[in-house]
Image (cartoon, grey):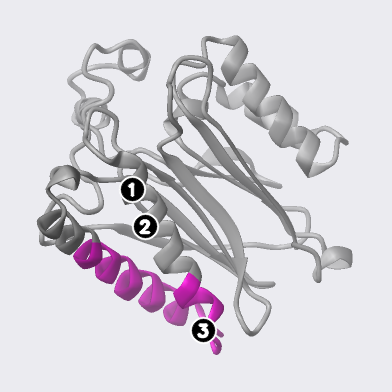
Amino acid sequence: MKAVFKTDKGKVRLHNEDAGGVFVNQDGCRLAIVADGMGGHRAGDVASEMSVSYLKKEWEETKGILTADDAEKWLKEQITLVNDVLLEHAVNNSECDGMGTTIVAAITTDRFATLANIGDSRGYILNESGFKQITEDHSLVNELVRTGQISKEDAEHHPRKNVLLRALGTEKMVEMDIKTIIFEEGDILLLCSDGLSNKVSETEMAEILLNQDELEEKAETLVTIANDSGGEDNITLVIAEFSEGFRGDV
C-alpha cells in the first residue's frame, strides 16, 4: 500500500480549516482521513484538527481489524465519540460555539476498504470498472438532485451549494454513511475536501490518477489545478494505491 496526504490553504482563505492524514495501526492497516472545518462557523480549524487528532490516537493503538464488520464497527463507534468530544469542547469554550467539520475516513487493508463520511468531503475509487464517486454528499443541492428537483449540472453552480445537511460536532445524534468495497492490486482510492471536487472534474481526476507519475506528483498536480481554477477554498486530499510490492510503505 502506498499513500500520500496533501493539504493547501488555497489562494483566497487566510487560514486552512482542513485537516487529515494517513495513519498506521499496530497491524499495519491504514486509516486515511480528510476533514473540512465548516466555513462560516467559528473555529472550523479546531473541529477538523481535533477530529483527526482523536482518530489518529485511537487508530495507532488499535489492532485486530480483520473483517469489514470490524472496520465498520470501529469507524461508527469512534466517529460517534469524536462527535461527543467536539460538542463538549464547544460547550466549555464559547469561542468554539457552532464549530463543525465534514469528515471522510477510510480503513484500508489488503482485502477491502471501508469508508465513513459525514458532509460533502468525498471518496472516489479508480479500478477496472472506471472512476466513480463512492460517497454521497450530505448537502442541500445533492438532496435536490437526488429528488429530481434540479439536474446535476444545475447543482454545480447552485447559490446554496455549500449548505450542508449533516456535519460532525453540530448535533447530539450523529448520522454517517458507512460502506465497504473490495480494494485490490492496482486500485486507487481518492479522498478529498470540496476545495478539490468543486474545482477539478472527475474526468481530470481520473486522467491524473491514471498517469505514470508518483503519488506525490499526482497530489501536487490536483492541488495546482484547483488553485489555477480559483483556489477559493482550502484543498485537501489523500491518494491511496493498492500495490502489492509496496505494502510496507506509507
Where disc 3 sits, the SS reads loop
Give the Cα separation between the discs numbered 3 and 1.
24 Å
- Circle 2: residue type: Met
Q: Are marks 2 and 1 in contact (CB under 8 Å)?
A: yes
* 74 magenta-colored: yes
Where is 6 relative to 40, above or below? below
Q: Are marks 3 and 1 in contact (CB under 8 Å)?
A: no
- Front residue of 101/138: it is 101
Residue 29 in view (yes/no): yes
- Circle 1: residue type: Val
Mark 3 crowdedness (10 Å alpha carbons): few <14, some 14-19, many ≥20: some
Give the Cα separation between the discs numbered 2 and 1.
6 Å
Where disc 1 sits, the SS reads helix
Residue under the point 60% across and 59% down: 22
Where disc 2 sits, the SS reads helix
The number of discs equals: 3
Residue 116 in view (yes/no): no
Residue furthest toward the bottom?
Answer: 64
**Residue located beneath label 3 in the image:** 62
- The stretch in magenta equals 57-85
**Residue located beneath label 1 in the image:** 46
Residue 160 location in percent, x, y?
A: 21, 18
- Circle 3: residue type: Thr
Give the left or right position of residue 123, taking residue 23 as reference: left
Give the left or right position of residue 156, taking residue 239 as reference: left
Residue under the point 36% across and 78% down: 73
